[in-house]
Image (spheres, rainbow, N blue to C red):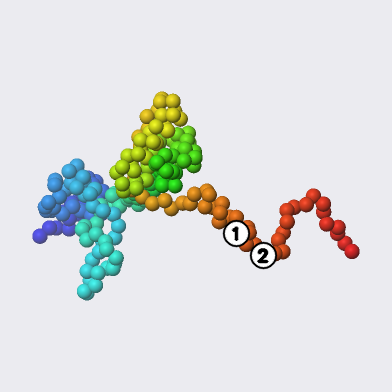
Amino acid sequence: MKTPALTLLLTAVTAVCGCATGSFPVCDPGDGGRPGSAEWWAKKAELPPGVRQVCHKGKTWPVRPRPTCERQQFTHTYHSAHYWPLPYVCQDREYMRNIVGVQTSLGWQQETTLYDRHFEGGQQLNVPGRLHLTDILEVAPSARRTVYVQSSYDSETDNARVANVQQVIAELTGGTELLPVVLRKGRDYSRPASEVKIINDLYNGSVPTPRLGGGSATAAPVGP
């Protein structure tokens, strides 16, 4: 049986040698080193921060999932609170950057695709198709300058479209640029300008009377 003086001495030595929440246990199996050693502290540093989940009278406290391992040492608890939400916010930011990166790539792919409406008979680029291809060559960043061609699910038609696009690229660039032309399976969710114009003309033609005319430079008289 330990005397009170010996217990007090052991507590004082522990407080001087380390900064744990209490005296080190006599036996600390599986922690990878002697209590207070560098290996021991490295093992304790792997413990997650936060509240621990315990079972009391058949209920778990708290109810939400929490770690059930031993608590952090005091210095590690202070470190977690001082630098919170680091380093966990770095993982969240990287996760969001990956999502935004995928959306950005798909958006550029949508903008650099030549669809069925950009081709006419003989699978030649029509005027809107050549204008769209010119925008890809002039506006798209070099890292996004890949020309996609909507697949028609017919190999002969697809090969003719790709060959024509490569020919037009050579004409527009004078053969100085060799851009990749890739087939892409997808749908066109936009409308051609001619269809938009027809819808706009039908809307303007269906406006009931009386109709407001254009602005006049003559101001209406004010007063009686």
For image coordinates 47% across by 38% down, the residue present is: 130
Amino acid type at circle 2 is Pro
- Tell me if residue 123 comes above or below residue 1 in the rendering: above
Q: Is residue 127 left or right of residue 21?
A: right
- Quarter of the N terminus within the rendering: bottom left
Residue 127 position, x and y percent, is 49, 40
- Depth order, front residue of 20/197: 197
Residue 95 position, x and y percent, is 34, 49
Residue 192, can we see it? Answer: yes
Q: CA distance from mark 1 to mark 2?
A: 10 Å
What residue is shown with label 2? 208
Name the outermost residue toward the right.
224
Residue 129 position, x and y percent, is 46, 41
Name the outermost residue toward the left.
1
For image coordinates 29% across by 60% down, the residue present is: 51
Residue 114, image quadrant: top left
Crowd class of label 2 (few under 14; some 14 to 19; many from 20; radius 10 Å): few
Name the outermost residue toward the front.
122
Picture mark count: 2
Residue 19 position, x and y percent, is 26, 48
What residue is shown with label 1? 203
- Tell me if residue 34 comes above or below residue 50 in the rendering: above
- Tell me if residue 194 comes above or below residue 224 in the rendering: above
- Quarter of the C terminus within the rendering: bottom right
